[in-house]
Every structure is written in C-alpha cells, then in structure tokens.
Image (cartoon, rainbow, N blue to C red):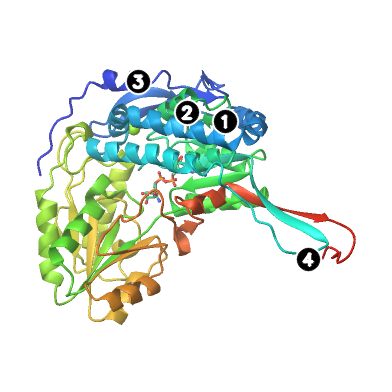
Amino acid sequence: MKRTAAGVEVADVLDQLSSTELFIGGTWRPATDGTSFETVDPATGEPLTDVAEAGEADVDDAVAAARAAFPAWRDTDPDERGRIVHRIGALVREHADALAALESLDQGKPISQAKSDMEGAARYFEYYAGAADKTEGRTVPVGAGQVDYTVREPYGVSAQVTPWNFPGNLFARGIAPALVAGNAVVLKPAEQTPLSSLRLAELCEAAGVPDGVVNVVPGFGDPAGRALTEHEGIDQITFTGSVPTGQAIMRAAADTVTPVTLELGGKNPAIVFPDADLDAAAEWIATAIFTNAGQICSAADRAVVHESVHDELLERVVEIAESHELGAGHEDPDVGPVVSEEQLEKITRYIELGTEEGATLATGGGTPDGDGYFVEPTVFTDVDHEMRIAQEEIFGPVLTVLSFEDEAEALEIANGTDYGLVAGVFTRDVTRAHTFARRLEAGNVYVNKWFGDTNQTPFGGYKYSGIGREKGFEALDSYLQTKNVAIDLGGEGDLPGA
Ligand code: NAI
Ligand code: MG
C-alpha cells in the first residue's frame, strides 16, 4: 500500500483564521488561565497550531454571554433570523474551498470529501433558514367557551458538543436549526479538530448573528465538555459521539432536567441477497466503509451476505479495497489518515483482536511505515456474529463480512447488536425490500444504496444509537418547546380547565 507525502502550505490554509482563541460574546479571547493545546495534522503527526483551551470559568462566561444574547435573538422577527441564517449559508458556500482545506488539514479527510461536507454545511443553513417563519403552532378545538392555541418557543441556550469525524458539517447540522428556532448556542468542538468551528463562528458573525448568540469554546471533554453539559445555565443539549460519553451527558442532564439529543454510534449491517446487483452492492459497501477512513457513525460496518454470493461479493469488495491509495487529505487520496494516534491504536487493537477471535484477514490490516496515522483498507471474512469485531464500533476502515442462510438469520444478525443507527438491504425483490425496511431496528434504512439521506431527511438512532433526530423538520423539535395557551371567553359553554 503506497502512501504519498504531505506537502501542503500549512500557513496558507491557516491564514483564513483570524484567531484560534475562544469565541465568546462576539470577541476572541484567551482562556482565563492562559491554557492552550495543539491540534495536529493526522497525515504527519505534526502540530498545526495552538488553540485556546476553555476551562470551567470560560464555559461560565460563554453560557452567560449566550444567556444575555438569547432574549433579543428570540424576539428578532423570524424572517430576519431566517435572512441572517441564509447569509451564513451563502458565506459557507462562498468559502467552501478554503474551509475544506482547513478541515482536511485538521481532520485528515480527502479534500473532495471535506468539500462535500462544507457544501452540506451550507445547505443546512439554507434549508433551515426557510423554516424560521414557519414554526407554527396549532389551534385546539376545546369548545365554545375557550380559545386554545399552542406556540413553539425556543428553549434558550443550546449546548452542543461535536465529535471529530465531521466537525464543520456537524457545527452546521446543530447550529442552523437551533438559531432558526431562536436559541443561542455554546458549542464545544472536539479537541482533535477545533479549527473549522472557529472559522464557521466567524462566518456566523459576518452574516449578522448578534454577539453572544453563537459561542465556541474549544477544549477537552473534561473540563470543557463536562462543564458545559452540566451547566445550570443551559436549556438543551445536542451531542454526537460515543455511547459512554452520551451516557455521561445524559446522567449530567438528569440533574438539571435538560433535554438531550444524542446521536451515538452504529454497527450498521448491509444485507446482500443473491438477487442484488452485486457490483453495485460491492461499490456501495466499499464507499460506505472506506469514506472518511471508516470514521462515520453510519458506515457500513458489517456486510451480511447470503452464503450463495458471499465469495463473489467478498472478492469484489477486496478488489476495491486493494485499489484504494492512502494519502494526505490535500492530495485527495481514496483514503486519508485516521484522526489521531489514539484512534489509530484503537483500530489496530481491533484488527489484532479480529485475528485472535479467529476471523480471516481477506485484505489490509497493516499500517504503512512513515509518519501519520494511516490504516490500510481492511476486510475481515469468516466473521462470527458473536465476535467483538462484529459487535463493537471500530470506527476505522475495517469491514467485517458475515454470511447467512435465510431471511430469518439475516434479520437476526442485522438486529443483533446494541446499536440501531442505519441498516441497508440489497435486493431486487420489492416485497423483501419493504419487509426488511419494516423489520430492521434502525433509524434509517437504505435499499440498494447507502448514505441515502440528505439534509432534509431525519437522521438518528434506535436502541443505543441515540435519542432524538437530527436533520429534516424533525430536528427543529429538539430546539422548540410547546406552550399551550388556554383562554376563557366566559359565557355559555364555558369549559373549566381540567
Ligand atoms: P467522545 O464521545 O468521547 O468525544 C466526542 C465529543 O465529546 C468530543 O468533543 C469530546 O471532547 C466530548 N466529550 C468527551 N467526554 C465528555 C464529557 N464527559 N462531557 C462532555 N463532553 C465530552 O469520543 P472519542 O473519545 O473522541 O472517540 C471514541 C470513539 O467514539 C470512537 O472510536 C468512535 O467509536 C466513537 N465516536 C462516534 C462518533 C459518532 O459520530 N457517532 C463520533 C466520534 C467518536
Ligand atoms: Mg487535528
């Protein structure tokens, strides 16, 4: 497996950032205690730049800034909020190339994938902008003596904690609906990838978002993430990341009775029947496990293949895996590095474990010599459903291939993990496709494709994969609470309140 050397002009890419400090109340400032941390280029392992590290006092300040900014933002005419959010989308689109270069450098992903993330980010702002003046309530028929209606009101301050796999795109996924609904936001990006969020905060401000409505506090899970999600001054939490961290956040939220939207991991099955277009299925599965070096919650982690076409499907996927070249993100390789040394070690441990558990490496499994955090596209076969590599989220370019005899077994394997984020079925049989769509325990089902969702389709998990929905109109429900207003008209037919 060949790997090309990095050679991007780091300074040119970083030049777009006016600061790498904390963005609080519309101004850049260092951490109260002066602490900073380094973010690293995963293609080389070299530090890129220092970033201010938020501590508890900084989180307090950011939450206070958001609280102070909230009432005026809530009361801004919704059409004006919509125009501002639409302008953010236009600015993200205008700067998509530069943002993509920043994301690719900080996170490692191939530049064309980063570009697509940024176009998707622009699209979130554009999509939700139009909803700002359409968050309508209802009138409820309660009889002649009363008028009753509902109003959908913002919660207040939304605390958002994002992961490192799609930092810029997820900034937009959470912030666009939160703003449109009238909330202020404090966002803590992952410590591995803080840069795109800082730049995006700047673009929010340039678009006319008032000071304090969007705040960004780079830092670690502890103290910054913990302090933010435990804070008394927040009213809603949006988190994407691992199950244990999601659970910790949910426990903390219990103390302050704060609603959470959790988008956690997956161990997603791609079920392949003999009547499927096998070439297309192999392409989809390879794309769905090797894009972003497999660091996608909705990756196709498990190919669950009918025994009669197992060898054929395996051969095609292996061929694609072996054709992929590794390289630094800016070279736009097929597969970039994984995000960090820690993640590289985690993936390597799972590859060793797979062999220990008795699975067979059909291809890959190695980490090329040299700098950077690279893992070869890897395919395991002879995988038993009970093995840990078939049950646990690896979050790397590692596909496990399992086989099944009949529909019942396919379903049992597909649903037989703690997760339930996405699932796919490849078949030309329309009855089977619909039956599986109904029986698969997952928030999203793909038929004869993968990553079928767009900004306007709801996305989220069953079981341990999460609570609530991102994207689509459904996401607005995370940022709006319903108030019912009951008015007595007096006179005949009056209904006393229940
Ligand atoms: P993580 O879930 O710990 O980190 C995600 C975010 O949560 C980061 O911003 C982190 O700083 C923050 N965080 C950590 N501890 C926190 C706490 N106690 N309170 C508040 N915020 C906290 O995930 P990590 O350690 O980066 O990755 C470990 C594994 O998690 C990955 O290998 C992968 O399996 C999974 N993961 C899943 C993602 C998804 O999209 N569902 C994204 C990232 C990781
Ligand atoms: Mg980095």
Q: Earlier in the sequence, mark 2 or mark 3?
A: 3
Circles 3 and 4: CB distance less than 8 Å? Answer: no
User: Left or right of 277: which side holds 205?
Assistant: right
* Circle 1 Cα neighbour tier, 10 Å, few/some/many (<14 / 14–19 / ≥20): many
Q: CA distance from mark 1 to mark 3?
A: 22 Å
**Disc assigned to residue 213:** 1
Q: Residue at x 41, y 51 (%)?
A: 456
Q: Nearer the viewer, mark 2 or mark 3?
A: 2
Q: CA distance from mark 3 to mark 4?
A: 60 Å
Tell me what residue is drawn at x 47 percent, y 31 percent.
218
* Structural crowding at the residue carrying mark 4, measured as other residues with C-alpha within 10 Å and reported as few (<14), some (14–19) or many (≥20): few
Nearer the camera: disc 2 or disc 4:
4
Earlier-in-chain disc, 1 versus 4: 4
Mark 3 secondary-structure assignment: loop
- Residue at mark 2: 204
Q: Earlier in the sequence, mark 3 or mark 4?
A: 3
Query: Are the two marked residues, 2 and 1, in contact with CB atoms closer than 8 angstroms?
Result: yes
Task: Say which of 154 and 160 sits in front.
Answer: 154
Which numbered mark, 1 or 4, is in the foreground of this view?
A: 4
Q: Residue furthest right?
A: 491
Residue 16, disc: 3
Residue type at the position of mark 1: Val
What percent of the width, then of the height, locates residue 14? 32, 21
Report the residue at 27% width, 45% height from top: 292
What secondary structure is found at the residue carrying circle 1?
A: loop
Residue 111 point in image, percent of width and height: 24, 35
Q: Position of residue 32 (x, y in %)?
A: 57, 21
CA gap, disc 2 and disc 3: 14 Å
Name the residue beneath numbered marker 4.
Answer: 143
Label 3 sits on what residue type?
Gln
Measured Cα–Cα span from mark 1 to mark 4: 41 Å
Three-letter amino acid code of the residue under disc 4: Gly
